[in-house]
Image: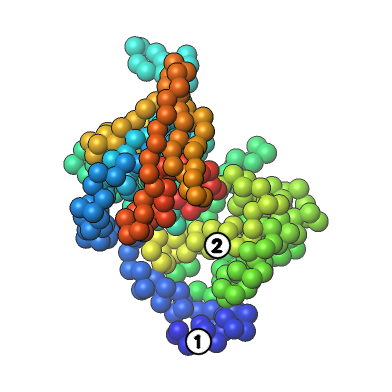
Amino acid sequence: MAEQETRDNGQGGINRRRFVTGALAATAGAAAGPLWGAEGARAAAPALLKSSVTGRNVAIFGAGMGGLSTAHELAERGFQVTVYERKVLGGKSRSIPVPGTATGGRKDLPGEHGFRFFPGFYQNLPDTMSRIPFGSGTVRDNLVAASLTAIAYRKKFLRVPIPSELSNGLTPEVIQDFLRSAIIAGTTIPLTQINFFLSKMITFITSGPRRKLGQWENMSFSDFTKSDIMSVEYRELLTRMFTASLVAAQPDRANTRTIAMMFEALLYSGLGLGPYGPPDQVLNGPSNDVWINPWIDYLTGLGVQFKVGWSATGFDHSGGRITGARVTDPTGAAGHRHRRPLRGRDADRAGHAAPVVLHEVRRPSWPA
């Protein structure tokens, strides 16, 4: 199999007429279960590092997904972590109460920043959730498979198919026929345009890594799907659905490799192939109640300190490294924090080649 992949990739990818179930089954066998299921490996990792980093101090700016995740990984490894957040813990992942919706002495109804969609190809987030205690289990237990996936479009109710029935005799042609039938049933996109879009997706799936990295990495998804010459419905339901709608990325800026890999992973998770969970998962309650608040409680128990209302006003640096950060407290009074950077082996083990002051960087929202 390895020799065949090497030979095929050198010629532009696996032969599209020989893309059979066995190739995908090998992928599934290589990772028999989701990464969040590896209890032993997950529990052992922090213990390997804890003794060598105890006493190290880390400041994290921003308590959204990135900041909380960073605090989680470092705190479990023995770092002393302080998280500075200007507004509220949880960022856009938190529930936001809707003013005036409370009745009968209850709290305002919880709103969410967007639909809470946890696709099966997410690996890191379910792993993190599986390490947050919740009742007799973990927060990961609050993710449940959706029974229906649909899109509201121009007063239409479009059901999104989950191709679980394709697990036998899988070929590019079978996949294309199934998806074509599903799109035709729910939309008025011209058949020729549907065929073109699906042919492009199959071309990507059956391409080797050289082409994906060398060509598709440098082409926008909009150019890849030729959306500028297609119908409005094609652009909105096919090109934009996989970019702006799902991951808040612009189709003319997001590269093809990133977006098409997501399409590929969604397909595989629907087929039960690879180290994926159910293709569409949702939380069984408001995000604050079943995820964010238990997470903050767990991190607090690990010794993480949260300073809400504090703002970073600047960073100090020396020799190409950040050495400290300037902050203001909730009253606007200035404060100053200096930290020396991690060096040598400790820096490598922490997964960050210095500095000890970490600044949350905004990145595209996938993969989590």
* Residue toward you, 270 or 274: 274
Is residue 241 visible from the viewing direction of this image?
no
* Residue toward you, 151 or 205: 205
User: What residue lies at 49% left-to-right and 45% top-to-bottom?
Assistant: 318
Element at badge 1?
A: helix
> Image quadrant of residue 192?
bottom right
Say few, some or many: other residues with alpha carbon within 10 Å of mark 1 (under 14 / 14 to 19 / 20 or more).
Answer: few
User: What residue lies at 21% left-to-right and 38% top-to-bottom?
Assistant: 135
- From the viewer's perspective, is 80 left or right of 286? left
Q: Is residue 55 above or below residue 176?
A: above
- From the viewer's perspective, is 346 left or right of 161? left
User: What residue lies at 59% left-to-right and 83% top-to-bottom?
Assistant: 10
Is residue 346 visible from the viewing direction of this image?
yes
x and y percent of residue 132 in the render?
A: 27, 43
**Which amino acid type corresponds to the residue marked 1 in the rendered image?**
Gln
* Residue toward you, 239 or 358: 358
Q: Which residue is mark 2?
A: 261
Cα separation between marks 1 and 2: 21 Å
> Image quadrant of residue 26?
bottom left
Disc on the earlier residue, 1 or 2:
1
Q: Is residue 30 above or below residue 53?
A: below
**Which amino acid type corresponds to the residue marked 2 in the rendered image?**
Met
x and y percent of residue 127 in the render?
A: 33, 52
User: What residue lies at 59% left-to-right and 57% top-to-bottom?
Assistant: 259
x and y percent of residue 279 in the render?
A: 45, 55
Mark carried by residue 348: none
Q: Which residue is mark 1?
A: 4
